[in-house]
Every structure is written in structure tokens, then in C-alpha cells.
Image: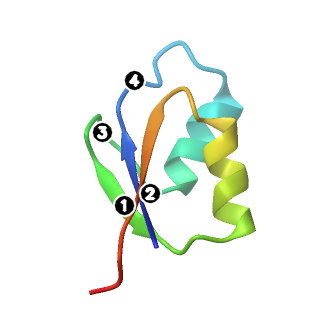
Amino acid sequence: MIKITLIKSTIGEVKAVKDTVAALGLKKIRSSKVCEDNACVRGMITKVRHLVKVENVENA
């Protein structure tokens, strides 16, 4: 599992980047989402890596 946090604003970004951030479930700065660590999510993170912070989370 990984925790994705939006750390920068999407203002001024192209529509594809904004749509990717929305698809990850992030709406506001400092909002976080815990997701499965799979290839699909990793690809989206790569596209918006300049806007997000990614942390590993252990299953509780």
C-alpha cells in the first residue's frame, strides 16, 4: 500500500495532469489517499510526480 499526498497546486497545469490528479482521488493541497501499489497507480504517479509525495504504508 502507498500513501499519495498532493503537495503542490494544479493551477497552471495542462488538463491531462489535472485529470490524473483527480483520478488519484486528490482534490485539495495536503489531501491524501491510500492506494494499492500496482502498475496503473505507479504510472499515474509518474505523470504527476512533480505535484505529489509518495510514502509506503504497512497494512495495519
Q: Would you place residue 57 above or below residue 30 in this image?
A: below
Q: How many numbered marks are there?
A: 4
Dividing the picture into quadrants, the one containing residue 29 is top left
Amino acid, disc 3: Lys
Q: Would you place residue 43 above or below residue 28 in this image?
A: below
Task: Return the residue at label 2.
Answer: 25
Q: Would you place residue 31 above or below residue 58 in this image?
A: above
The earlier-in-sequence mark between 2 and 1 is 2
The earlier-in-sequence mark between 1 and 4 is 4
Image quadrant in which the C terminus is located: bottom left
The earlier-in-sequence mark between 4 and 2 is 4
How far apart are labels 3 and 4 at the CA level? 8 Å
Q: Residue at x 57, y 34 (%)?
A: 18
Q: Secondary structure at mark 3?
A: loop
Q: Secondary structure at mark 2?
A: loop
How far apart are labels 1 and 3 at the CA level? 11 Å
Q: Are marks 2 and 1 in contact (CB under 8 Å)?
A: yes
How far apart are labels 2 and 1 at the CA level? 7 Å
Amino acid, disc 2: Gly
Left-right relation of 19 to 57: right
Q: Are marks 1 and 3 in contact (CB under 8 Å)?
A: no
Task: Return the residue at label 1.
Answer: 33
Q: Residue at x 70, y 34 (%)?
A: 16
Name the foreground residue: 59 vs 6. 59
Left-right relation of 2 to 46: left
Task: Return the residue at label 3.
Answer: 28
Q: Secondary structure at mark 4?
A: loop
